[in-house]
Amino acid sequence: MTQKLNKWLSDRSITEVECLVPDIAGIPRGKILPADKYNKVLRGSGLRLPEYVFGQTVTGDYHDSVVLNAAVGDVVLKPDENAAYLVPWYSEPTAQIIHDAFYLDNAEVTVAPRAVLKRVIRALNDRGLSAIVAPELEFFLVSQSSDPDHPLKTPPGRSGRAETGKQAYGIDAVNDFDPFFEDVYDHCETMGLDIDTLVHEGGAAQMEINFNHGEALTLADQALIFKRTVRQTALNHHIHATFMAKPMQYQPGSSMHLHCSICDLKNGQNMFSNSSGEDTETFRHALGGLQRYLAGGMALMAPYVNSYRRFITTYDAPANVAWGVDNRTVGLRVPAGDYRSRRIENRIPGADTNPYLSIALTFACILLGIEEKIEPAKPMVKESDNLHTLPRNLDMALDSLDKAKKLKEVLGLDFISVFNEVKRAEAEAFLKVISPWEREYLLLNV
């Protein structure tokens, strides 16, 4: 453990440490240790987890892998001193620290999602570029229920009544959940999460939190911790918060839009526009790369069967790689504004995505576009609600990923193999479920 991290723990009188490592789904896995034990473990052989934690499905199951080797056993977790946060919802001083995974020979575990993002960032850094991103995360507040077969319900707020209509940007609708959001903001301030705007989205009790822009790995870490914070805070207020892409049948879906830019690694200058405010070649080639390669990585932005229900009604959930200035019906929106903040908004990822993987994919496409000098298509200046050019379901998306040779090389062949194994297994598990729709329409009619 570094001197910096040791001082951080000591200054905050930490008594317990939650050691986190994000898996394929973006679920924090790991171990919880007393602080003094944590220090001893790190000074010794290190904190260990089975390598197969990265082959675990969202259902908690394990499957055979051509990459992961159960006989190899454990990997070693090493803390990132820049990814240490307090856990503000506990009474005891507790830390949550994000770790990276390494084999016993000190080689990085390349199938770990955080390592995938770091791989893409290094490739950009090698070219004198840095990846800057600002996520926008949407989520629903829903009433607690122990029955997974029961449709979700909107919880009542302070008014005692649940929302029934659309309240997009409604101030009073947000204020109805003031106690919850006050705790969320207090927790984020305590942890140093750089969140910005809170707005009410179009769904009943659907909210969005915007992050300020920053370095890609830092913002991916913050998105992981933020999702955990919102879910925990909701539990403390006797409701649930869900980041499912489409949790309710008659409500809109939830996204994680990514505002992305490329900066000069040395001076931080935005490479998407010049001093005259004109678009640069880097900007055009970034768009071109996203247009050419993003469809091949659809499974990383929409990783579950449920993810594709969000695109059925395409308004505000575009299923295409067209681009346009301030056009919210295209997958790649370029917000109008000051040329110094020129950026591309990837509107395709769902809120259910692993933030490390969606961010890694987005910048992998940008990197390929810059390297290959890909020119984008002409901008879309009209609505494109009916333009659907991306894979329509998880199986199609995984098939597209199998064929995306250059994208797989940038992200890592071993990672793509494990990701494919996990997602194929989850899709197969879903096929074993008999839905209410099938019972309603097929039971007595076929």
Image: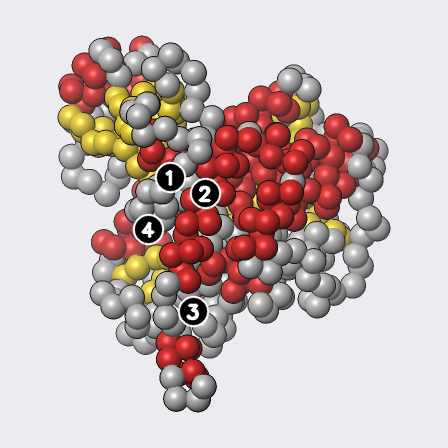
The amino acid type of the residue labelled 2 equals Glu
Q: Is residue 399 left or right of residue 197?
A: right
Give me the C-alpha separation between circle 4 and circle 2: 14 Å
Q: Which residue is mark 4?
A: 59
- Where on the picture, by quarter, is residue 187? top left
Q: Inspect this view and state whether residue 101 appears.
A: yes
Give me the C-alpha separation between circle 3 and circle 1: 34 Å
Element under label 2? helix
Give me the C-alpha separation between circle 1 and circle 2: 8 Å
Q: Residues within 10 Å of mark 3 (few under 14, many from 20)?
A: some
Q: Residues within 10 Å of mark 2 (few under 14, many from 20)?
A: many
Q: Report the residue at 60% width, 60% height from top.
A: 392
Query: Is tag 4's residue or tag 2's residue first in the polypeptide sequence?
Result: 4
Q: Which residue is mark 3?
A: 248
Which sits in the foreground, 364 or 406?
406
Element under label 1? loop
Q: Report the residue at 68% width, 19% height from top.
A: 127
Dot in front, 3 or 1? 1
Query: Is tag 3's residue or tag 1's residue first in the polypeptide sequence?
Result: 1
Q: How many badges with numbers are in the image?
A: 4
Query: Is tag 1's residue or tag 2's residue first in the polypeptide sequence?
Result: 1
Query: Is tag 4's residue or tag 3's residue first in the polypeptide sequence?
Result: 4
Q: Inspect this view and state whether residue 229 appears.
A: no
The amino acid type of the residue labelled 3 equals Met
Element under label 4? loop
- Where on the picture, by quarter, is residue 277? top right
Give me the C-alpha separation between circle 4 and circle 3: 20 Å
Q: Which mark is residue 421?
A: 2
161 relative to 121, above or below: below
Dot in front, 3 or 2? 2
